[in-house]
Amino acid sequence: MYRTGDLGRWLENGLLECIGRNDEQVKIRGLRIEPGEIQAQLARFPGLRDGVVVVREDSPGDKRLVAYYTLHEHTPAPDAEQLRSHLQQQLPDYMVPLAYVHLQALPLTRNGKLDRHALPAPGSAAQLAQAYAAPQGALEQALAGHWAAVLKLEQVGRHDHFFEQGGHSLSAIQLLNRLQQAAYDVTLAELFQHATVAAMARLLSERTAAPRSTELIPVRTGGSGPALFLVHEFTGLDVYFPALGQHLEGDFPIYGLPGVAVGEPQLRTLECLATRLLDVMRKAQPQGPYRLAGWSFGGVLAYEIAQQLLGLDQEVEFLGLIDSYVPRLTDQGKARWSGEHAHKRHLLLQCRAYWSAQGAAGVQPLAHLEQLEALLEPLDFADLLQRCRDQGLLFEQLATAPPQALGHYLDREVAHGHALAHYRVHPLGMPVHLFCAAERPTELSRRSPTLGWGEILPAGELHCISVPGDHLSMMKAPHIQALGHALGQALAATRAKGAVSAVPHQPLLRIQSGRPGHTPIFCVPGAGDSITGFIGLSEALGAEWPILGLQARGLDGCGVPHGQVEVAARHYLEAITAEYPDGPLHLIGHSFGGWVAFEMAGALQAAGREVVSLTLIDSEAPGGNGALGRPYTTTAALWRLIESMQLAAGQDMGIDPERFAAEDDGMQMHLLHAGMVRVGLLSPRADPRAMHGPARTFASALRTRYQPRRPYQGKVRLVLADDPSLDAAGKRGSSRGWSRAGAGRLRTCRCGTARATTSACSRRPTSTTWRPGGMTAWRCPRGGHVIGRGATQALALPAPGHPVSFIWNTAHYGSTVFCKGLAAGRCSPPSTDLWSSMEKSKFRKIGMGLLLVVVAGLIFYTVQAPAEPPQYLTAKVERGDIENAVLASGLLEGIKQVDVGAQVSGQLKSLKVKVGDKVKKGQWLAEIDPLVLQNTLRQAQVDEENLQAKRRATAAQLKETKAIYERYRDLQSDASISQQDYETAESNYEVQRANLLSLDAQIKSAHIQIDTAKVNLAYTRIVAPIDGDVVGVVTQEGQTVIANQLAPVLLKLADLDTMTVKAQVSEADVIHIAPGQQVYFTILGEAEKRYYAKLRGTEPAPQNFLETQTAGTPKQNTAVFYNALFDVPNPDHRLRISMTAQVRIVLDTAKDVLMVPVAALGPRNADGSFAVRVLDAKGHAQARNVSTGINNNVKVQIKDGLAEGDRVVIGDPLPGTAGA
């Protein structure tokens, strides 16, 4: 603890009011300054008699240091530059006064004290300047007038430096506004680089009349290394670019990326803001590696730019976030930035923030603001602004701005606030450097020491670096120098390591191998969908056709989805070429996948490779007014996903749109998971995080714009579902749109969308029968075939000579179902394509694929059909093993894991270990430079020796005073001495006794200081707290660690001989598990190997208990999971930290028993048995009661009532089919 020096008093309302200080300390632009220290150094200047330094605020908000001095007689008066140079040698720049006033005598009050109010304002002669040189020409004279007005000077010479004359970052913005209002197009960076009137005039005269790009601000143009791009902060201004740039050493250019110009339409999503700046960056630097940094809001925006660069397969070498919080910690909610009152709310918030920092002076304005907040809705913006102006609530920057300019300024900030509130942060799979201000608000520090990033980014990706200052002062002297140094060090370190590319991804997955001689089929799924949707195609075609799927990157939640169709197509073609370097192929694309397939076809055509067929299913034309290519917020994209799922499921998911829109991103994902469980798209046991990857990929596809750059001359088959909301022109527009996009030889098939009906189209097909490049589906009674999406919708394709038929609706999301059948000899198309192959197929069965979104497993039942089309979906009673288990996803940890930190601050002098080393408890790991603490110890020892010497002197004096006292006491009895002499002797004796006691206490305190110094010195030697392996080195040699608030982590140790698995078990399942139950798990990349263990126990509180208690989040808004714990030996260290474990906690198991799918079970009877339907020899369904055993929600054990080989009904006849 320490004394702050602030004086305060409690008010009746319980608030603490700051009323001043008990010293002369002042605060200027976030920096605390003690004028007495400056005066002491000023007094050392030769010839000075008296000196005083005060803070003047001649203009509201413009505080500056001014020195006043008097001289001894016959001393020549020094000029201001001499005094400034003297002080610069003794003090940091921010403590050096900006003006020096020579007085004959300091003004005094009647009591002989300094009369500060009588000190005169500094004139132009008091300012620092070279010999005055008058401005030359009209331009220089006009600029000098602006200089003088902002600096409050009578005149400014052509060589006078703006910042040496008292200018600072705030006054620089004021000057910039004046210049821009006077039609001088100048940026802040240019003002820093041309800070004299002459230099600025030269810059403006040499500028051509051609339009100048304001999208990229050169801060430093020279250098051979990759450029560093600094991203604008919340205001959109370029204030900190030049200030930080001048403290960054290195041989590389620095560019600033400012916000959208005021007065122009503002972008309201972070994705759109990032796309704009990415285009600006790539004009200056077309290829990576890229390096990005951003302060505050700019850090989050830089994060999204990095994500988009990775989505373009570009290298990102460095990403620096400068005191940037995860949006959910600071965005103030979505409602704050939405609606017609957003600008008014923001204006009042700006005023409230200013007056809240003014102490007692802000009490009355804050009361007025509270009254205006109550009148917010009935007042329009102009009325509110005028009332603020009339009541003096606008601080200088707002008060002096014209109403239109102020409106534009607020418009930009509100747009940025809206973008931040609607942004969802996803992991990037690359290192992120977070530069945290050492001084932070207590509340935010408590909520997250890593500003929220540690809860989102995987362990090892986030590197936290503490820098001095708070959120604002870190961008001002002297802290900005430390920030620049830390940022430069991090840039140099990452330069040595090299750039980071996107997470490796293999998109090509084989659905079936096929046989030689058959052309391979490559399938591209729709937005957020998986290739498992095409599994049914293998059943439709037969085993001879090679079928492969191209899985989108990012579905697993790890990789960054591709951000351009061209990049995704190039990535897919590289994978295809590696597997099939030449030869013809078929391409199929659904929805967004149709765009990618079209781009792939064009690239293959340009390379001279044959594309036998290109089929686009329900894919809107590029560049139109469809759902794709729009600036979706995260909320809007998720709601589109929910609408698609509801259409696919055929029922409402029970999610209220207004509540969904108001919730934060975490709660929205929880509502999505709950809704999918409600309609049966997900199992209740599915991990809610399973939808993060698909939702992210889906949103990325929705935002992607695409316009083909080359036409495709081959045949294109476009399958479109009739949309009742479109008129005839709208329906023709889709085909015309694809024709305009370059699909020259286009044939379109439109199919009806009536649900659960069968009808015929009055329009018969033309003589050229449409062939879907190898796809067919359910056979209709009229001879048509169905191609389907999801379990409840499909499109009917015409058989030659028959009208178009249809059965089910289509949807954008779900699983693609393909079934095959014969056309009873009525179809005889040519045998040159896949269609004829399916027609000639000898298989006579129906396959049905049921895909539950993001559920581990695909249940595919194959039914042997009689000669007539099958009326029921059935499954055979089979014998096998059954197991009922709680499914969970877990993470592996070492049984002991320790973050080894530093308890003292200083430079990390040496590391004694490296990653992978084995260490023993007590082994020396690292050393903090001990020099400072060694000096501290020596100083404490010297202080103790000094006190001992004082004690000896005091003891001698005590002995002497005691003897005098005792002698006077004896003499006083016979009046040989006066009473006064006796009392004096007694007093001297008591004083010395007290002095000795005081010194004894000080010596004890000195001993404590010595002990503390010894302990702190010992802390510089970091030793291992456990036996284990070094699994991570967080801080490198030469880096400085700050241990004033949080112990910085240097190394991470873990005991890897035994691994602990923390399996996340939902609250619905946790009641069924108990210690001792058998557990086994598998890991990614080794799915066939099982690791067995016994359940050790379950943590009593849910995983997010501390978070919900701290943040006050209601329990009903949070998915609840408990960590089930078990240990597994790891002697060969094959298992590693943070591996994902697919865990099964076994509840029941049975071997070699009869089983049927759960779908076969009918109603439960009173005796506990279930009704099932069994097909007899003639194919008729007969009711039967069965007794059951283990039920794992997929299959159920049959104890009695069925025999092996019986066929049970699992699905009713299809509507409209024969016999239905």
Image: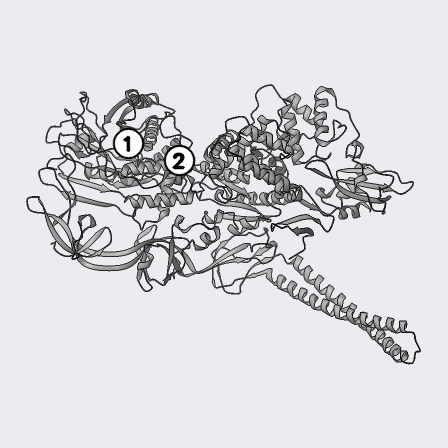
Which residue is pictured at 54% across the width and 26% down the height?
263
Label 1 residue SS: strand
Residue 477 in the figure: left or right of residue 758: right
Residue 818 in the figure: left or right of residue 1131: left
Residue 1182 in the figure: left or right of residue 486: left
Q: Which residue is mark 1?
A: 587
Of discs 1 and 2, which sits in the foreground? 2
Q: Position of residue 1033 (x, y in %)?
A: 51, 53
Q: Amino acid at mark 2?
A: Ala
Q: Which residue is mark 2?
A: 636
Q: Is residue 1167 above or below residue 849?
A: below
Disc marking residue 391: none
Q: Amino acid at mark 1?
A: Leu
Q: Quadrant of residue 590?
A: top left
Which quadrant would the C terminus be assigned to in this image?
top left
The Cα atoms of the two marked residues, 1 and 2, are separated by 31 Å
Of 117 and 586, nearer the camera is 117
Q: Position of residue 476 (x, y in %)?
A: 64, 41
Q: Position of residue 349 (x, y in %)?
A: 56, 38
Q: Quadrant of residue 1055?
A: bottom left
Q: Position of residue 863 (x, y in %)?
A: 15, 43
Of 926 and 680, nearer the camera is 680
